[in-house]
Amino acid sequence: MKLFKLGLTSILAGGALVAGTYNVDTAHSHIGFKVRHMMISNVNGKFNTFNGTFEYDEETKTLRSLNGTVEVKSINTENAKRDEHLRTSDFFAAAEYPQMTFILEKVKGETAYGKLTMRGVTKDVAFEFENNGLVKDPWGNIRVGLALSGKINRFDYGIKYNEILEAGGVAVGETVKINVELEGILIRP
């Protein structure tokens, strides 16, 4: 019986090495977006400052939880004037609402369901989910790669600024495409 308990303890302890809480490695992760501009092209952007944690179970290959925060003022579209405008109340109102958050509720198949909060408004969202698996890096760290992608309507979050174009249409599209690439590092106990 003692041998069985010792064996079970070893299996459970070994499993803890690949099932646990991970910190998002911001150097190897990306929070990006794309939105229509002038009805003919897209503006791509990203957020430079963000953080998060997630729980991942390698045995069942499931994402159990994900909590992420984005610093709105870190928006970067590679155009300083546009980025300043995006930080104003016309768009993100970064001074009043400095952070966006995402909280995962569940993953079902290849869809991740959660709550996205932006400008003080929380909405249910569904994103395509990609589980890129687990690896041990050359320094002995356990890493997991995940991806989320999908679309939101910016009007749902009170971001309604726009200009009507002389030829018809609007300057900024309503639909925002979101692309999130996350690499997490297992937190050592």
Image: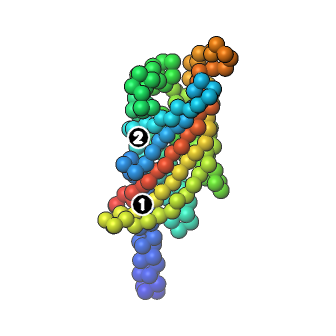
Name the side, left or right, on which 115 lies relative to 92.
Answer: right
- Mark identifier at residue 50: 2
Name the side, left or right, on which 42 lies relative to 141.
Answer: right
Judged from this view, the residue extending furthest toward the left is 139
- Badge 1 element: strand
Q: Residues within 10 Å of mark 2 (few under 14, many from 20)?
A: many
At a point 39% along the width and 57% down the height, the residue shown is 185
Amino acid bearing label 2: Phe
- Badge 2 element: strand
Residue occupied by mark 1: 143
In the rendered image, the vertical position of residue 76 relative to residue 182, given as above or below: above
Q: Mark 1 and mark 2 in contact (Cβ < 8 Å)?
A: no
In the rendered image, the vertical position of residue 108 relative to residue 168, given as above or below: below
Residue 117 pos. (x, y %): 53, 33
At a point 51% along the width and 54% down the height, the residue shown is 146
Can residue 157 be seen here? The reply is: no
Amino acid bearing label 1: Arg
**In the depicted view, which residue is nearer to us: 167 or 145?**
167
Q: Residues within 10 Å of mark 1 (few under 14, many from 20)?
A: many
At a point 49% along the width and 40% down the height, the residue shown is 32
**In the depicted view, which residue is nearer to us: 24 or 163?**
163
In the rendered image, the vertical position of residue 134 relative to residue 130, given as above or below: below
Q: How many marks?
A: 2
> Which of the image's four quarters has the C terminus?
bottom left
**In the depicted view, which residue is nearer to us: 77 or 112?**
77
At a point 48% along the width and 35% down the height, the residue shown is 45
Judged from this view, the residue extending furthest toward the right is 168
